[in-house]
Structure formats: C-alpha cells, structure tokens
Image (cartoon, rainbow, N blue to C red):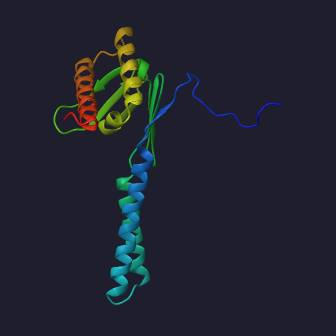
Amino acid sequence: MEPRFLPQSEPDGLTVPDNTWAGEARTAAGCAGLLLVVSLIVEACDGGLNLPAALLWIALTVVLFVALLPARVVAAPGRLTVRTLWTRTSVRTDRLATLHWPDGIERRLMLTDTDGGRARIDLRVLLANPPLWLLLETDARTSYENGTLRHGVRDLDRLTRHVERDTAHSVFTISGLH
C-alpha cells in the first residue's frame, strides 16, 4: 500500500527556505497587534471608543503589518523565488545575466536571469541563511562559467568577501574569541 501524502519537493531535490522569515513575520504581527491594543486602550480612556476611530486604528495596524512583513525567500538549485503579499518573482540562478549589489547603504541584491526574470533579495536574508547563500553563490559561479553572467562578477566577489567576513565575525563572537 502506498502512502497517501508524499512530501512535495523541488525536482532538483534541495529546497532552502529563509529560516528567519517566520520569526520576522511574528514580530511584524506582534508590533501591529501591540499598536492596535495600545491605540484602542488610549482611545477608550480618552473619552470613549467610537466606530470611526476603531476603524482608523485597525487600518493603521494593517498598514504597519504590511510595511513590516518581510519578503519570503526560497531557493532551490537553479532557482530563487521571492514572495511578498502581492507579488512573486523568480529568477533562474544558474542562468544569471546580471548580479548587482550597489555600493553604499543599499542592502538589496538585484538578480536578473537570461529569460528576463528579476528578483531583489535583502542581504540580511543571505547573511542569516548560509545554506541559501551557498546555493546562490554556487549557481552564480555556474552562470559565470557558462558565460551568461556578464555583469556583476565584481559585485559577486565583493559580496562573497562580505558574507565570509560576517560569518567569521559571528563565529568568533559566539565562541568568545572576539
């Protein structure tokens, strides 16, 4: 007898999600919920809560939650997908055409594949998820070796050094050597 429910997996086998997303989503919900509770209590203590005021605070709470909710990132060999509340973008990481990480305070990496797919990923996601970074870096190097990655090799090297430096710093901090 065969099992009824088989786990779904990517065709290439390995799927690497952003392991910090659930915690960040809970934090966003907590902050929004706290705003709602505090604002309703203040409104009730300040002469009574009415329907228009309650609806306004609920709307502001929803706006705060949407603003704080991070994008959900999932990678598999050859593909990186970024999901927000309204959009889902996917890029073939084994066929990258450009990889752009701007100098300065910008903390987002822009990826474009040869099919025109685009994805923007926050650097914190890569720093917090070494398996996700390793998969992305391996696929980007494959793109370079295959000749599709024409723009962004310097950014990739700079990003690699940054991730390695941050990882080493974290290891030293955790071990008490720093």
- Determine whether 17 is above or below 93 in the image: below
Q: Residue furthest front?
A: 176
x and y, in percent, of residue 68 in the image: 35, 54
The residue nearer to you, when weighing 65 against 174, is 174
- Determine whether 112 is above or below 23 in the image: above
Question: What residue is rendered at 35% in x and 55% in y?
Answer: 67
Image quadrant containing the N terminus: top right
Where is residue 63, by image quadrant?
bottom left
Q: Is residue 10 left or right of residue 119?
A: right
x and y, in percent, of residue 86 in the image: 46, 48
Where is residue 153, by image quadrant?
top left
- Determine whether 162 is above or below 27 in the image: above
Count of marks, rendered view: 0
Q: Residue furthest left?
A: 104
Q: Residue furthest right?
A: 1
The residue nearer to you, when weighing 43 against 7, is 7
Confirm whether residue 141 shows in the render.
Answer: yes
The residue nearer to you, when weighing 34 against 144, is 34
Confirm whether residue 63 shows in the render.
Answer: no
x and y, in percent, of residue 62 in the image: 41, 63
Image quadrant containing the C terminus: top left
Question: What residue is rendered at 32% in x and 22% in y?
Answer: 98
Q: Residue furthest bottom?
A: 47
Where is residue 64, by image quadrant?
bottom left
x and y, in percent, of residue 121 in the image: 35, 36
